[in-house]
Image (cartoon, rainbow, N blue to C red):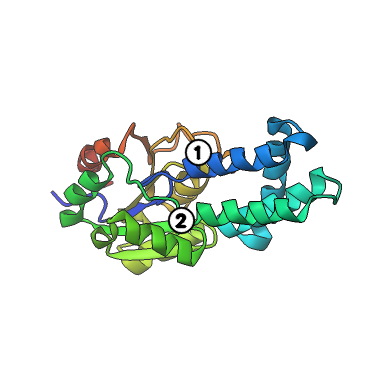
Amino acid sequence: MPHAVTTLGFDADDTLWQNEHYYKLTEARFTDLLAEHGEAPVVSGRLLEAERRNLKLYGYGIKGFTLSMIETAIEVTDGKVAVDVIDRILAIGRDLLSHPIDPLPHARAALERLKPDHRLVLITKGDLFDQERKLAQSGLGDYFDAVEIVSEKTPAVYDRVFRRHGDGPERALMVGNSLKSDVLPALAAGAYGVHVPHPLTWALEHAEAPEDAPRFRRVDTLGDLPALVASLRPD
């Protein structure tokens, strides 16, 4: 029996390897720097507001996050932030750029099982150089037939990627931890969307699960993905 899907798209951060964990550690260092100007939840809330405003300007990734930290520091100190604090913010941003890449449990085993019968495509948002660094250091790069680093994940992007690297979205599946970016737009493009939850998914990636969507699926870990893919039948 032919496979229902021939192309599998994978998100990277917090799907294949840890990422938000390091952002949270960096955010804690940032709020400590500004402790005399506000309690940690308040400063974190202001930082999230800055990130939301700046996404269209800076895009996703560590560089935009660092700029948002600097902007937040200026705001919460009414423009009186000390130069040495700005210097320390830049330093913790640089530290974030060098954090280790730890593949999540079952990631490598799932890719090994799925690669022989499917085209595997990494589809990720963020800074080009940083995402390329993460993929290289993860040791997972050889499993992928293609890598697409995009500024945003939209139905049009998924349609283009799955036509370029496969048989179109109807024969494709996208898996990731973000309902907003990995699942909903993939479903809208006509692909399967598989949610693999991560406890630290970024607040701006939250969305309601489309429980009634015919092509929506959920797995607890990537270890469950090969069996799910094998269970799918052509429409």
Residue 60 visible from this viewpoint: no
Of the numbered discs in the image, which one, if any, rests on residue 98? 2
Where residue 194 appears, as percent x and y from the top left, is: 37, 41
Hey, what amino acid is under mark 1? Thr
Task: From the viewer's perspective, tell me whether residue 110 is left or right of residue 170.
Answer: left
Task: From the viewer's perspective, tell me whether residue 86 is left or right of residue 113.
Answer: right
Question: How packed is label 1: few (under 14 Cα within 10 Å), some, or many (20 or more)?
Answer: some
Residue at screen point 78% across, 52% down: 82
Task: From the viewer's perspective, tell me whether residue 85 is left or right of residue 26.
Answer: right
Residue 33 visible from this viewpoint: yes
Where residue 77 appears, as percent x and y from the top left, is: 82, 45
Circle 1 — which element? loop
Residue 226 picture quarter: top left
Task: From the viewer's perspective, tell me whether residue 157 is left or right of residue 143.
Answer: right
The one nearer the camera, 230 or 13, is 13
Q: Are marks 1 and 2 in contact (CB under 8 Å)?
A: no
Circle 2 — which element? loop
In this rendering, which labeled residue sits more in front, label 1 or label 2?
2
Question: How packed is label 2: few (under 14 Cα within 10 Å), some, or many (20 or more)?
Answer: few
**Mark 1 or mark 2: whose residue is earlier in sequence:** 2
Where residue 151 appears, as percent x and y from the top left, is: 54, 62
Of the numbered discs in the image, which one, if any, rests on residue 201? 1
Where residue 72 appears, as percent x and y from the top left, is: 74, 48
Residue lying farthest bottom? 164
Alpha carbon of mark 1 to alpha carbon of mark 2: how far?
A: 20 Å
- Count of numbered marks: 2
The one nearer the camera, 122 or 60, is 60
Hey, what amino acid is under mark 2? Ser
